[in-house]
Image (tube, rainbow, N blue to C red):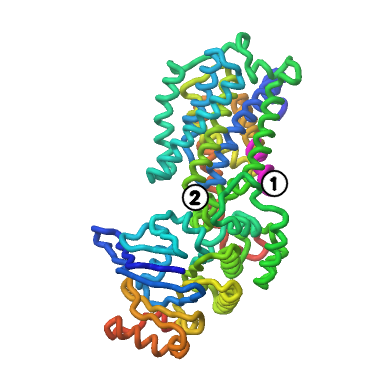
Amino acid sequence: MLEIKGISKTFNVGTVNEKQALNNLSLTLEDGDFCTVIGGNGAGKSTMLNAIAGVWPVDEGQIIIDGTDVTKLPEYKRAAFLGRVFQDPMNGTAAAMGIEENLALALRRGGRRTLKPGIRNEERKLYREMLSKLGLGLETRLTSKVGLLSGGQRQALTLLMATLERPKLLLLDEHTAALDPKTARKVLELTQEFVDEQKLTALMVTHNMKDAIAMGNRLIMMHEGRIIYNVAGEEKKKLKVSDLLQKFGEVSGGEFANDRMMLAN
Amino acid sequence: MLNMFTIGELTKLFNALPGAVAQGLIWGIMAIGVYITYRVLDIADLTVDGSLGTGGAVCIMLMLSGHSVQVAMLGALLAGMLAGMVTGILHTFMGIPAILSGILTQLGLYSVNLKIMGKANQAINVDKFDLLVSLRFIRNVPVYKNTILIVAVIVIILIVLLYWFFGTELGCSLRATGCNDRMARAQGINTDFCRVLGLMISNGLVAFSGALLSQYQGFADINMGRGAIVIGLAAVIIGEALFGKIFHNFALLLLSVGLGSIVYYLVYQVVIWRGIDTDLLKILSAVVVAVFLAIPYWKSKYFTKPVKKGGNN
């Protein structure tokens, strides 16, 4: 479903801030793989997701989604394949537009935007149905402006928008990091529900190692722009947080995992 | 208060009011164009200072060369859209910040407008040409020829068209682009295209307004667009201040911009009537707009902390 072949990306080339964010990274996801991504700050986790989404072009390598080479496609064209949820709940929705208008935008992802009505009456039934699944009471507030919703509500809505039109690949970029623990739990449950229901292929970046182990069938650990640990299936199920911490310790030369990861456990 | 003015003076003001309303309505179309860039697309587009004049110049020159008023106004609309497209391309394809793109186009348009007119000012005679609107058609004309009525009808038609457009799939993607372009791209919206399209629609309206304005005053002038952005912003802000609490529907918001423009010209008329030095009018407009633009910022900065019991906000 997803094939990343040796991509590299260096930011701020030729300046003192030059940073190689991705270093000849390769990864293959099979159809239905749910892969969690962990790694220290600056390991390149979000950069990898942005490379897939096409936020900027990569320096070298190739990205293939479901047989289509998307390496040269602009971000908005790749969107046809992707569902994305960002870390900041503000980023995934249009605050000044209504809940139903946001959903209508998402329903048309990958389609041509024409002069037909931006939202049709019969869609509203679908939206109410989908929103009621979130269990947040949003189904009665179709026309409310999204800006009035809480961070957790917006993130749940973004998740719904990302999966409303089944994406070939779901990209979750620390999508619960900005939420309080209870809301984060709820959004994670919804994530699992949506992925299971539609049998989605997904990449989920997280700082929480317990979640990384508990969720999905695959796990990768990144360090300095490459994948340094890649487990799947039974082996992943047996993983413990202590194993991951040890692994972190090994790659960062004895230096222990960063504070944020410690706090997350 | 009343006894301070003579009846004659009051009559003078009263006589000037219909003209102010007509002018306000014409500038209202321009302000609606500004609303589309400033509020919907979240771009402060300075192209309008040039494209207003372009609209006037194209309209007058086409009419002087024998074209009908309809053709002339369509030409003005298209010329404005072209100007908007140039700004859009400077901004998206060439990566120049929006505000600078507008300034560059505006500067370029000064030469373009001069070339279109051949000189700095071109007059058109209302008696010899079949104009749609004129300051002569305010009083003592059949109702269907009344400038205020004609422009009001045009404004309403434009609002209906824009309301329809911004409810379509394409219109919604334009709004999403202005609201959150990152989200828009993630939903597969070509944000660059949307920005260019929005700038084209906006400047098309502004040039259309310029076409009406030049007919109304009977001439097109190289300086007619100077400070247009400020008047447009003033209309947007006045409209929001007066009607923001009651108007939420998009069509009504556009209407409030049009009404804001009328209020601006009525106030302007009163200021002139009170005998204020007209040299000072532009700085007065600038100060008023600056203060109103600052109010939301001041509100968020100084009035969001919990106020002691009984306080508002």
Residue A97: percent from left, percent from top: 61, 54
Residue B92: percent from left, percent from top: 42, 45
Which callout, 1 or 2, points at the residue further toward the start of the chain? Answer: 2
**SS at mark 1?**
loop
Mark 2, Cα crowd under 10 Å, few <14 / some 14-19 / many 20+, is: many
The tag on residue B247 is 1
**Disc 2 chain ID:** B
Residue B105: percent from left, percent from top: 42, 34
The tag on residue B17 is none
**SS at mark 2?**
loop
The answer to which quarter of the image holds residue B288 is top right
- Residue B248: say if magenta: yes
What's the residue at 38%, 80% (across, down)? Answer: A230
- Residue A92: say if magenta: no
Q: Which residues are magenta?
A: B244-258
Q: CA distance from mark 1 to mark 2?
A: 30 Å
Of the pair B236 and A143, the residue shown nearer to us: A143
Residue marked by disc 2:
B190
What's the residue at 45%, 40% (across, down)? Answer: B88
| CB-based contact (under 8 Å), mark 1 and mark 2 | no
Of the pair A144 and B166, the residue shown nearer to us: B166
Indicate whether B2 appears above or below A96: above
Indicate whether B1 appears above or below A46: above
Residue A78: percent from left, percent from top: 47, 58
Q: Residue furthest top?
A: B128
Three-letter code for the amino acid on which mark 2 is drawn: Asn
Three-letter code for the amino acid on which mark 1 is drawn: Phe
